């Protein structure tokens, strides 16, 4: 997938996750407070998710493309970074969605277990990154991702980090 696809994917994901994290369809009422809360959440998600989605393709400039920064060890680093350093929340979502889009939405796979193995993994789906259908494929994949993330968030464990928690952890450092 090209940069445009990754940004489109990340922006839609931030918007959708903002809704999933803040809107309970059974009780939601469009008050100033609830809309403001939704807008804040989308803002909190937007830049970290977009930056995460752009990060793996840095390996077009150094290392090996679709290998050096397209693997599970890199994703684990972004997952654990907030736990140890209390910043870079939500960047892992951008990195993870980049991998999904590359594997599901484009012809070439990624080396999930690099540097242990250079084998590139791919699904038999996807279109050429230059295809005129690339945007439609991106939107379809993003919708499926949101369904999975909503399921995890509602039924398994919270993917959200409240702004109060984030501010408190930053406050405790200074
Ligand atoms: Zn990529």
Image: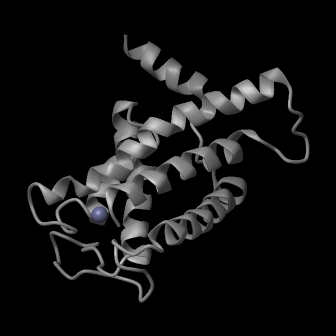
Q: Which residue lies at the image location 35% right of the left edge and 36% below the top edge?
A: 84
Q: Position of residue 110 (x, y in %)?
A: 28, 74
Q: Quadrant of ligand 1?
A: bottom left
Quadrant where the image shows the C terminus: top left
* Front residue of this view, candidates 21 and 124: 124
- Residue furthest to the front in view is 132
* Front residue of this view, candidates 104 and 81: 104
Q: Which residue lies at the image location 53% right of the left edge and 32% below the top edge?
A: 44
| Residue 66, above or below 157 | below
- Residue furthest to the bottom in view is 124
Q: Position of residue 113 (x, y in %)?
A: 25, 73
State whether residue 134 appears in this view: yes
Residue 60 quadrant: bottom left
| Residue 32, above or below 147 | above
Q: Which residue lies at the image location 82% right of the left edge and 44% below the top edge?
A: 24
- Is 61 on the left or on the right of 42, as rendered? left
Q: Position of residue 56 (x, y in %)?
A: 27, 56
State whether residue 158 appears in this view: no
């Amino acid at each position: 997938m090209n940069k445009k696809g990754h940004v489109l994917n990340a922006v839609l994901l931030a918007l959708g996750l903002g809704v999933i994290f803040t809107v309970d369809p059974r009780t939601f009422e469009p008050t100033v407070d609830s809309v403001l809360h939704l807008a804040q959440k989308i803002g909190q998600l937007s830049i970290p998710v977009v930056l995460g989605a752009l990060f793996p393709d840095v390996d077009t400039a150094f290392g090996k493309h679709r290998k050096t920064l397209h693997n599970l060890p890199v994703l684990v680093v972004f997952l654990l970074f907030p736990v140890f350093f209390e910043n870079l929340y939500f960047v892992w979502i951008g990195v993870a969605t980049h991998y999904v889009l590359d594997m599901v939405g484009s012809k070439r796979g990624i080396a999930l277990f690099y540097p242990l193995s250079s084998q590139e993994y791919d699904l038999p789906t996807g279109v050429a990154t230059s295809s005129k259908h690339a945007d439609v494929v991106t939107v379809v994949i993003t919708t499926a991702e949101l369904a999975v993330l909503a399921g995890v968030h509602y039924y398994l464990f919270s993917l959200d980090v409240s702004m109060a928690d984030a501010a408190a952890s930053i406050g405790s450092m200074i």
